Amino acid sequence: MSTAVSVESRIDHIDVSDDTITAHLVDGRVISVPLAWSWRLSEATPSQRANWELIGDGHGVHWPDIDEDLSADGMLNGVPARRPAKAEPLKSGMAREALRAQMAREMPPEAFRELLHVLAAAGDVRLAGDRLALSGHRVVLSTDDAIRAARIEDAFRRAGLDPPPVEDVFREWGGAHGARLKDWLVEEGRLVRIRDGRLFHGEALEDLRCKLRDFARTSSTIEIGTFKELAGATRKNAIPLLEQFDEERLTRREGNVRRILTNDAAR
C-alpha cells in the first residue's frame, strides 16, 4: 500500500524521548520514528533535544545546538538522517591502496604510483610511506590526546636506548586513542620503529648516530662490545640497533665487526 504525502504536512510541535522522535502535525496526524534515525539526536543531551524550532513554515524542525534538521516529508517517507563516515582525527592520511581501491580500481598499480608522484611533485599531496594526504592536511590533537602523547614521548625519551615495553607505556598513558597516538608519534618522527619492531625515541637514535660518526674519526670499524659501551646499551638492544644502522647504511657488517660508512671514517 502506498501513502501519498500531502504538501500540507506541516509540524505543529515535536517531542523527543529516549526511544522515539514524535512529530505532531497541524492536521492532527502523529508521526513517530525511532530515535536512532537521527544520530545527532541520539547522542544529544535532553536539553539539546528540547531546544528545537520550526523551519519552512512548519515543514521541518531544526535543533540549533546540534545542527540537526528533520522534515515532515522525510519522517513520512522513512528517510533517516545518515551518519557521515566516522571521523578519524588522529589519522595522518589514507593508505595508498585503499585510495586506489575506492577511486581508481581499474588503473594499473604502476600508473597509480606514477600519478601519485606527479601530484606530490606538484605539491597537491604529501606522501609518507604507504600513506598519502592532501598537502595542507595536519593532525590536530585534542587537549587530552596532546597530554597523553607528551607523556608517552617523555617515557621513551627518559628511557634512552633501553626503551620500556610498548604495551606497558600505552596501557598506562594511551587511553582510547593509544594505537593512533603511537602511529602519530612515529609519523612525526618523535618515536622511531627499528627493523625488529621496537620503538626508540628519535633523539636517542640521533645521538647514537652522532657518537658513531665521531668514533669513525679514529676507527673505521667497531666491535659489538665497543658499540655497547659507546651506546650504553645492553646486548639485547645493541644487536638490533646495529642491524638498524646496517639497514640505514650507516654501518655494514664485515665478519665480527661493523664498518662505519661515513665520509669522516678513518682510513
Image: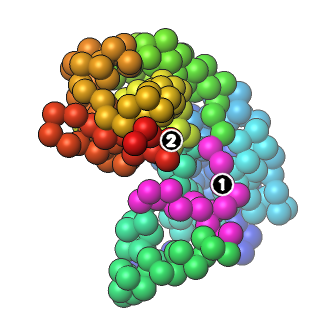
Task: Classify residue 54 as left or right of residue 173.
Answer: right
Position of residue 200 relative to residue 65, above or below, is above
Q: Which type of secondary structure does the marked residue at label 2 adopt?
A: loop
Which contiguous range is marked in magenta? 123-139
- In the image, what residue occupies the spot 48% across and 81% down? 114
Q: Which type of secondary structure does the marked residue at label 1 adopt?
A: loop
Residue 264: image tag: 2
Residue labelled with disc 1: 137
Disc 1 crowd rating (10 Å Cα; few below 14, some 14-19, many 20+) is: few
State yes or no: residue 128 in magenta.
yes
Task: Classify residue 240 as left or right of residue 103.
Answer: left
* Residue 93 seen anywhere in this rendered image of the structure: yes
Q: Quadrant of the C terminus?
A: top left
Quote the CA–CA distance across marks 1 and 2.
Answer: 39 Å
**Which marked residue is nearer to the observer: mark 1 or mark 2?**
2
* Residue 193 seen anywhere in this rendered image of the structure: no
Name which residue type carries label 2: Asp
State yes or no: residue 37 in magenta.
no
Residue 161 point in image, percent of width and height: 39, 19
- Name the residue at the right extreme: 57
- In the image, what residue occupies the spot 24% across and 19% down? 225
- In the image, what residue occupies the spot 74% across and 52% down? 61
Residue sitting nearer the eye, 53 or 97: 97
- In the image, what residue occupies the spot 58% across and 21% down? 150
Disc 2 crowd rating (10 Å Cα; few below 14, some 14-19, many 20+) is: some
Residue 26 point in image, percent of width and height: 74, 56
Residue 88 point in image, percent of width and height: 52, 46
Name which residue type carries label 1: His
